[in-house]
């Protein structure tokens, strides 16, 4: 039985979870998979903080070089996050003939094409199951399970923090700030939650899914991104009254030879499978031309789910010893199914619009006149209260409209003297 020596760089919350899982499951993995996975070295700049797992002192080092230049280490597991020095660590590990496992979605979004190209050139493996969806095996499904499919659509709830916040607003009637505070108290949100609630984390992950599903090389900066900061309790309630739930969706959708890539709050029908994904859970909906519709659901973050994904990559590398599966191009490959990323200005969707207006005759006529000017038709309109002369909320649902036309119409409507406060616009899918 071949022993695989693993070097782990990053001994924080996730790193400690991976170390604990490897220690506790070593015999189990030997018996189940016929591979002996040995922790050869653990590197972290902080070796004083107490971890939830104990390891022999001789395994610990502050020197990255003692991991990537150790000729006895077969696999380097990068768990420090961020772009630098993680990119340098991974590239140098590959140059030293070592396979790599990472959970670093930000790095893969930024430099995935460079990393995969080098790995392919050297005949090495890069495992990244933990980069999207925590313990959900979406990476392996797209790389292997759906290898014969032409993927048409991927909808993803891939940020547990935002989903928890929206779920608390929907289920418990909380305001955004209250729901965010609860997420922080439960450990779902960081002290600085910006990357999660701004949609940035979802954009990183969507770029990875776009590469696997469509062969599209797109950085997070190439993806249109909106977060959930502007969602109010009223929007949750009004959407529900119309039969919709609001979710932060990461969307990759084939549009002819172009690909729509966008992250934003989205109204989806309560009958859709994704509408019932609550709390901090993730779910990814995939439609392929052969396999049809599939939903992947599970815990999207945390030490245990992430450890499960990291271990699955290590075992996969160990089992095949990078034989027939060593060519990354088979899985991530540079075959492009789409020509380019569609401009957000050309996207066509239905829209939910909420605005505050003075309750007096002729207001709706002015607003509908602006929409008509830009070729936008109204599917329904509801005035939520009646207080003559006062400011009241008005909610509209439109038929499909071009994004650029909608943006121009909303700008003109916001400038009307009868419209007060901030307009809310949420796109509608499914």
Image (cartoon, rainbow, N blue to C red):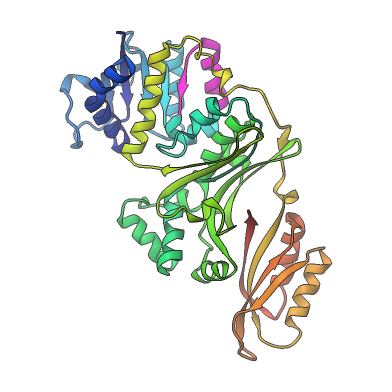
Position above or below: 292 against 237: above
- Front residue of this view, candidates 328 and 47: 328
Instruction: Please give the name of the residue rendered at 40% of the width and 36% of the height, measured from the top-left corner.
Output: 135
Corner quadrant of residue 355: bottom right
Q: Nearer the viewer, residue 74 or 315?
A: 315
**Mainly helix, strand or loop, the magenta region?**
helix
Question: What percent of the width, then of the height, locates residue 95?
Answer: 46, 12
The reply, left or right, for residue 43 in relation to residue 123 is: left
206 with respect to 404 (left or right): left
Q: Is residue 147 above or below residue 40?
A: below
Report the span colored magenta: 112-128
Q: Is residue 332 left or right of residue 62?
A: right
Residue 177 percent coordinates (x, y): 41, 65
Q: Can residue 139 be seen in this snapshot?
A: yes
From this view, report whether residue 172 is shown above or below residue 122: below
Q: Position of residue 142 (x, y in %)?
A: 55, 30
Q: Considering depth in this image, is 398 or 390 the residue closer to the camera? A: 398
């Amino acid at each position: 039985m071949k022993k695989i020596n693993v070097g782990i760089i990053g001994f924080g919350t996730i790193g400690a979870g991976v170390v604990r899982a490897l220690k506790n499951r070593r015999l189990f993995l030997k018996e189940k998979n016929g591979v002996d996975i040995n922790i050869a070295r653990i590197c972290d700049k902080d070796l004083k903080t107490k971890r939830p797992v104990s390891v022999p002192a001789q395994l610990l080092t502050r020197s990255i070089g003692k991991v990537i230049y150790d000729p006895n280490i077969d696999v380097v597991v990068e768990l420090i996050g961020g772009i630098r020095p993680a990119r340098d660590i991974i590239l140098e590990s590959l140059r030293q003939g070592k396979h790599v496992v990472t959970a670093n979605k930000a790095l893969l979004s930024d430099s995935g094409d460079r990393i995969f190209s080098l790995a392919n050139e050297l005949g090495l493996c890069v495992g990244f199951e933990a980069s999207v969806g925590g313990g959900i095996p979406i990476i392996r499904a797209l790389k292997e399970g759906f290898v014969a499919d032409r993927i048409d659509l991927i909808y993803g709830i891939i940020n547990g923090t935002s989903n928890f916040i929206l779920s608390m607003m929907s289920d418990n009637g909380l305001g955004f700030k209250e729901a965010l505070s609860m997420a922080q108290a439960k450990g779902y949100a960081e002290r600085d939650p910006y990357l999660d609630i701004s949609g940035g984390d979802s954009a990183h992950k969507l770029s990875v899914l776009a590469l696997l599903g469509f062969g599209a090389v797109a950085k997070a900066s190439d993806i249109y991104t909106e977060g959930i900061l502007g969602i109010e309790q009223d929007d949750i309630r009004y959407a529900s009254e119309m039969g919709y739930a609001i979710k932060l969706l990461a969307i990759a959708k084939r549009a002819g030879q172009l690909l729509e890539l966008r992250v934003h709050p989205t109204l989806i029908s309560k009958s859709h499978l994704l509408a019932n994904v609550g709390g901090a859970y993730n779910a990814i909906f995939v439609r392929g031309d052969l396999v049809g519709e599939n939903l992947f659901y599970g815990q999207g973050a945390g030490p245990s789910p992430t450890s499960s994904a990291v271990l699955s990559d290590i075992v996969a590398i160990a089992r095949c010893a990078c034989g027939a599966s060593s060519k990354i191009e088979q899985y991530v490959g540079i075959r492009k199914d789409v020509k380019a990323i569609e401009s957000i200005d050309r996207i066509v969707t239905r829209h939910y619009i909420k605005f505050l207006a003075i309750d007096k005759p002729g207001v709706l006529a002015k607003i509908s006149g602006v929409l008509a000017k830009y070729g936008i038709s109204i599917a329904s309109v509801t005035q939520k209260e009646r207080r003559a002369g006062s400011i009241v909320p008005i909610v509209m649902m439109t038929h499909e409209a071009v994004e650029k036309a909608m943006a121009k119409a909303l700008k003109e409507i916001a400038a009307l003297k009868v419209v007060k406060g901030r307009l809310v616009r949420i796109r509608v899918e499914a």
